[in-house]
Amino acid sequence: MLRAATLSLALFAPLFALSCGSGSDALGVAAECASDEECQAQGVDTLSCLTQFRGGYCGLAGCAANADCPEDAICVTHTDQQNYCFKVCGDKSECNTHRSVDNEANCSANIVRVEAGSARACIPLSSGTL
């Protein structure tokens, strides 16, 4: 019985990992971080830890178009007048899968998109924001 369960797990674990490994969660976009290495360990070596945001935010700075961003992220002009790749979201829970309660991001439609569209994005609080 134990042998059958072990064999079953060995056969289906890779399939489960593949089914869960798509989109920006696998990329680490919007994840809380303290260093670039934490973001890059998520599978995209171009992600940076944007420490100007509370708790850090795995993303990219300086995008000029959505094509500059990882999958499931868009280029947004933040209130600091800089462009960042932020995770696309439908609700707040999607923004905080990899964030602590103290450093939650908001799923906002009230954003300045670099390209036309209606997508909402996970917007983190700036480091100085309480």
Image (tube, rainbow, N blue to C red):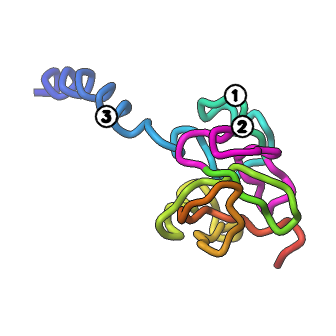
Q: Nearer the viewer, mark 3 or mark 2?
A: 2
Q: Residue at x 47, y 65 (%)?
A: 90
Q: Nearer the viewer, mark 1 or mark 3?
A: 1
Query: Percent position (x, y) of residue 56?
Result: 77, 54
Q: Regarding mark 3 in the picture, which secondary structure is present there?
A: helix
For disc 3, the marked residue is: 16
Q: CA distance from mark 3 to mark 2?
A: 25 Å
Disc ID at residue 47: 2
Q: Is residue 112 above or below residue 46?
A: below
Q: Amino acid at mark 2?
A: Leu
Q: Are marks 3 and 2 in contact (CB under 8 Å)?
A: no
Q: For residue 12, which quarter of the picture?
A: top left
Residues rendered magenta in the picture? 50-73
For disc 1, the marked residue is: 45
Disc ID at residue 74: none
Q: Main SS type for the magenta part?
A: loop
Q: CA distance from mark 1 to mark 2?
A: 6 Å
